[in-house]
Image (cartoon, grey):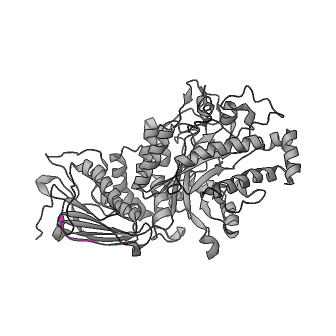
């Protein structure tokens, strides 16, 4: 017979679920008697764990109306937070001891403690994901905890999501919410795509026109660029420097690193609209250029001049100040999809190729990237760029985001460069999640929840040395057809939960042997968490009526991607 307050019967509490997402490395239990966190429960936080203490109080405490006050070490009725570096980076151990109504979370570092606290929140039930208590029958109901032991550690150190805030701006509060959603899934990198042809989204004090002009467009193409439809509402927005500082600090408190991307030398029409002299003015007239209002890859690229290099060094000086090295060791320089037509037509660009002896336009692109590789390295940062930066030879310190399949990542890893695997055939979450006709604005390949669950960031056949160069993996969400938070939610979820399990869990076997049924069973509990968080996820049987976008033209590719 169990003593203690199980809350069963009149209380309304129910047993917690060990249906965790992502699945931990090892779980023992649950077994024995149960108890609930209640007004007696406090937090006993060892030095170095104060961030998680604050987060537990603000998230779990708020959800259940519990003060969770600080308590001395060794007391019963406590959530004890401890550090033990022997566990390793980001690893944690979580023990629930019903006899003393206590939880102990030991992390290999402060991040590990935080991931353990995220696991505790999942154990406390879906209501732990609300912002205020839900009172049923007059009382709040955290789930019952029983004796349990969890050991866990991440498979990869880079578990990322790219948000494209350039094509459609996401207000700051939405970005903060996605930081919380990343943290809830033990994802730890937010890659912010801050600039593109269709908008410049970060305040740069010395170049005010980048946001005064570059942060808005007069109208927007609705659907794929082949669509005849326009939204004539001006679209825009940008983050002030204090907004950026707030996002970075909020993310750091949640052990999420923010990687800023300033895309160059392509994807630069918004910057050239703001400062026409950045363009290839001897080949095209850039004076009347506006921020682009449709989708695709603009031909307007940066001119390969000393003035452009100095201008972008000025941009990066401010960006590096906003994204400190401790939390943003890597910064992203884009380097993708740079059409070379304007450089072919520009006498200045051709003279530059001859003067530098770089052979052709690819060499010019490589010269741009190498310049910033050196410039960033001198300031203690690492450059990362899209796999096109392999063209013309990879800069010595550069890391690669492999998006056009695995091939670029394999080549870079085999040459000794660090790699983040994000192949578009597998983890571009703007791509449609079903072949059916109701999928909103269907783009790209069909990538179902199962497909994402079966993705492996390390392609078979990669040798051990090269495999060790795979820092991790990242899901990318480009925002041409995700015009607001609800659309972003729909494209991300539930697939981001599958992606998180792939990126985090050391327990997943190679893809063919993955237990989809077990994942789907655990997702039943996870959908309740997403609902409590207010996530507009795609239901397993398809979009809700208001999640559809009838009449908007997409661009479906063949349903199944080629092996890449
Ligand atoms: C990309 O999708 N152009 C990186």
Using the rendered view, name the quadrant where residue 15 is placed. Answer: bottom left
Given residues 458 and 304, the one toward you in this image is 304
Q: Is residue 73 left or right of residue 107?
A: left
**Residue placed at 41% from the left, 69% from the top?**
91
Given residues 372 and 430, the one toward you in this image is 372
Q: Is residue 276 left or right of residue 261?
A: right
**Residue placed at 58% from the left, 33% from the top?**
552
Observer able to see residue 402: no
The location of residue 401, given as percent across then percent down, is: 63, 57
The location of residue 444, given as percent across then percent down, is: 62, 47
Q: Is residue 282 left or right of residue 434?
A: right
Q: Is residue 498 magenta?
A: no
Using the rendered view, name the quadrant where residue 403 is placed. Answer: bottom right
Quadrant of the drawing holding the C terminus:
bottom right
**Residue placed at 66% from the left, 34% from the top?**
270
Quadrant of the drawing holding the N terminus:
bottom left
Range of residues picked out in magenta:
20-40
Q: Is residue 399 left or right of residue 190?
A: right
């Amino acid at each position: 017979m169990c003593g203690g307050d199980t809350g069963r019967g009149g209380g309304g509490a129910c047993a917690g679920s060990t249906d965790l997402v992502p699945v931990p490395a090892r779980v023992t239990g649950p077994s024995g008697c149960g108890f609930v966190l209640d007004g007696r429960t406090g937090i006993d936080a060892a030095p170095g764990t104060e961030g998680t203490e604050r987060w537990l109080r603000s998230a779990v405490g708020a959800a259940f109306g519990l003060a969770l006050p600080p308590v001395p070490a060794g007391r019963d009725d406590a959530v004890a937070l401890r550090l033990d570096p022997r566990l390793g980076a980001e690893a944690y151990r979580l023990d629930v001891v019903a006899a003393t109504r206590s939880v102990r979370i030991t992390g290999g570092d402060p991040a590990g403690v935080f991931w353990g606290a995220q696991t505790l929140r999942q154990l406390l039930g879906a209501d732990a994901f609300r912002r205020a208590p839900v009172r049923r029958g007059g009382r709040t109901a955290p789930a019952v905890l029983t004796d349990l032991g969890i050991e866990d550690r991440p498979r990869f150190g880079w578990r990322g999501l790219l948000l494209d805030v350039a094509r459609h701006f996401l207000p700051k509060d939405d970005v903060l919410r996605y930081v919380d959603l990343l943290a809830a899934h033990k994802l730890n990198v937010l890659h912010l795509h801050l600039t593109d042809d269709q908008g410049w989204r970060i305040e740069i004090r010395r170049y005010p026109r980048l946001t005064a002009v570059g942060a808005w467009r007069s109208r927007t193409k609705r659907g794929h660029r082949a669509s005849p439809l326009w939204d004539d509402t001006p679209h825009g927005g940008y983050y002030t420097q204090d907004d950026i500082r707030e996002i970075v600090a909020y993310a750091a408190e949640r052990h999420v690193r923010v990687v800023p991307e300033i895309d160059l030398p392509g994807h630069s029409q918004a910057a050239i609209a703001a400062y026409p002299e950045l363009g290839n003015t001897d080949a095209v007239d850039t004076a009347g250029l506006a921020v682009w209002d449709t989708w695709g890859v603009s031909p307007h690229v940066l001119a390969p001049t000393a003035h452009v290099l100095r201008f972008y060094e000025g941009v990066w000086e401010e960006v590096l100040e906003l994204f400190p090295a401790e939390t943003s060791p890597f910064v992203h320089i884009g380097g993708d999809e740079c059409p070379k037509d304007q450089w072919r037509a520009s006498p200045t660009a051709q003279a530059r190729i001859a003067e530098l002896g770089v052979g052709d336009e690819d060499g010019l692109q490589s010269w741009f990237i190498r310049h910033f590789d050196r410039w960033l390295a001198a300031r203690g940062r690492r450059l990362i760029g899209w796999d096109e930066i392999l063209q013309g030879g990879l800069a010595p310190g550069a890391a690669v985001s492999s998006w056009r399949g695995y091939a670029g990542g394999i080549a870079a890893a085999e040459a000794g460069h660090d790699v983040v695997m994000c192949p578009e055939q597998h983890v571009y979450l703007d791509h449609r999640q079903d072949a059916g006709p109701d999928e909103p604005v269907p783009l790209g390949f069909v990538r179902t929840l199962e497909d994402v669950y079966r993705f492996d960031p390390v392609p078979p056949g990669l040798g051990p040395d090269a495999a060790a160069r795979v820092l991790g993996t990242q899901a990318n969400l480009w925002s041409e057809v995700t015009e607001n938070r609800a659309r972003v939610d729909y494209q991300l979820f539930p697939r981001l939960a599958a992606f998180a399990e792939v990126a985090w869990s050391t327990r997943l076997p190679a893809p063919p042997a993955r237990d989809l049924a077990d994942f789907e069973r655990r997702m039943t509990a996870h959908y309740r968490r997403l609902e409590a968080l207010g996530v507009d996820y795609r239901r397993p049987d398809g979009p809700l009526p208001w999640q559809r976008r009838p009449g908007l033209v997409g661009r479906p590719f063949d349903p199944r991607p080629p092996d890449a």
